[in-house]
Image (tube, grey):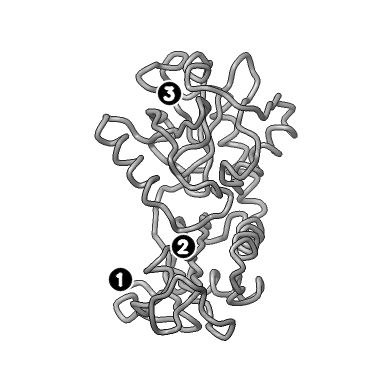
Amino acid sequence: MTRTVYVNGEYLPETEAKVSIFDRGFLMADAVYEVTSVLNGKLIDFDGHAVRLKRSLDALDMAEPCSKEELLEIHRKLVTLNEIEEGMIYLQVTRGSDGDRDFVFPSDETKPTIVLFTQNKPGLADSPAAKKGIRVISIDDVRWGRRDIKTTQLLYPSLGKMMAKKAGADDAWMVEDGHVTEGTSNNAYFVKDGKIVTRPLSSDILHGITRKAVLRMAAEAQMAVEERLFTIEEAQQADEAFVTSASTFVMPVVEIDGQILGDGTPGPIARRLREIYLDESLKAAV
């Protein structure tokens, strides 16, 4: 089935969707994005993604393409048109195009470009990877300094995933000044003696929507949480580890740079947090 996508106010077959070759998202990665998961045909944590989208747009002095209410309607319509039960909706907003290439921003009259499309992912919640856990390697973090803005500048994270693949692993954790920042597309955590440890929020990492929800749910479940810097070596000595993201929810990590954690299977805290997150998120889904 040909997907229906959304481009600048129109619902179109994906084969007919077009943006200008002068669009700044294409030429300069002058764009932000969000990915919202769909479970049981409903949107997971839409409000959180909408709030972060506005934060990213504001940080780059980029105009909002539509209201939050209009954005919700677009998401819901795409879910219906593409018959998505489990999957994701990708949203991208660029600064648009004024018909040529220039480092200087276009005039205020230039409208932003907005594109949304769905990805059908049956079995998203019942992921085989979550049952066995993933293996990660460490790589240097050489990204720009504003990682808290969710831009489409994803070349290095993509390279990082390929480094992991070539090493026979599933993903990579990035390290800067001796400390773990985050995964290539997720926030990173380890657990030692029952305490969950993760890096605190700053411009060094993405302010994960799933991260925020999981830490709140961990506190509600009376799990100890400490937000601080940590090293790869410290994480390698942990009892268990995991990552969080909108597309993987809570994903256990069982190996870091060849060091197996615990007995090499997903740990109890990661398993419990995934269960809680999916249960609570489905209840609040729109």
Q: Compared to 56, does 142 lie above or below?
A: above
Mark 3 Cα-neighbour bin, 10 Å: few <14, some 14–19, many ≥20 = many
Disc 1 designates what residue? Answer: 1
**Percent x, y of residue 102:** 42, 75
Q: Is residue 197 left or right of residue 128?
A: right
- SS state under label 3: strand
Q: Is residue 273 left or right of residue 14?
A: right
Q: Is residue 101 visible?
A: yes
167 and 217: which one is in front?
167
Q: Quadrant of residue 3?
A: bottom left
Q: Which label's residue is closer to the chain start, 1 or 3?
A: 1
- Distance from the alpha carbon under mark 1 to that under mark 2: 18 Å
Q: Compared to 89, does 98 lie above or below?
A: below
- Distance from the alpha carbon under mark 3 to that under mark 2: 29 Å
**Percent x, y of residue 112:** 52, 77
Q: Number of marks in the image? A: 3
The single residue placed furthest to the left in the displayed view is 166
Disc 3 designates what residue? Answer: 254
**Percent x, y of residue 17:** 35, 79
Disc 2 designates what residue? Answer: 90
Mark drawn on residue 248: none
Q: Is residue 140 left or right of residue 64?
A: left
Q: Which label's residue is closer to the chain start, 1 or 2?
A: 1
Q: Quadrant of residue 76?
A: bottom right
Mark 2 Cα-neighbour bin, 10 Å: few <14, some 14–19, many ≥20 = some
Amino acid under label 3?
Answer: Val
Amino acid under label 1?
Answer: Met
Q: Compared to 137, does 31 lie above or below?
A: below
**Percent x, y of residue 52:** 63, 57
Residue at image coords 35%, 40%: 160
Mark 1 Cα-neighbour bin, 10 Å: few <14, some 14–19, many ≥20 = few
172 and 192: which one is in front?
172
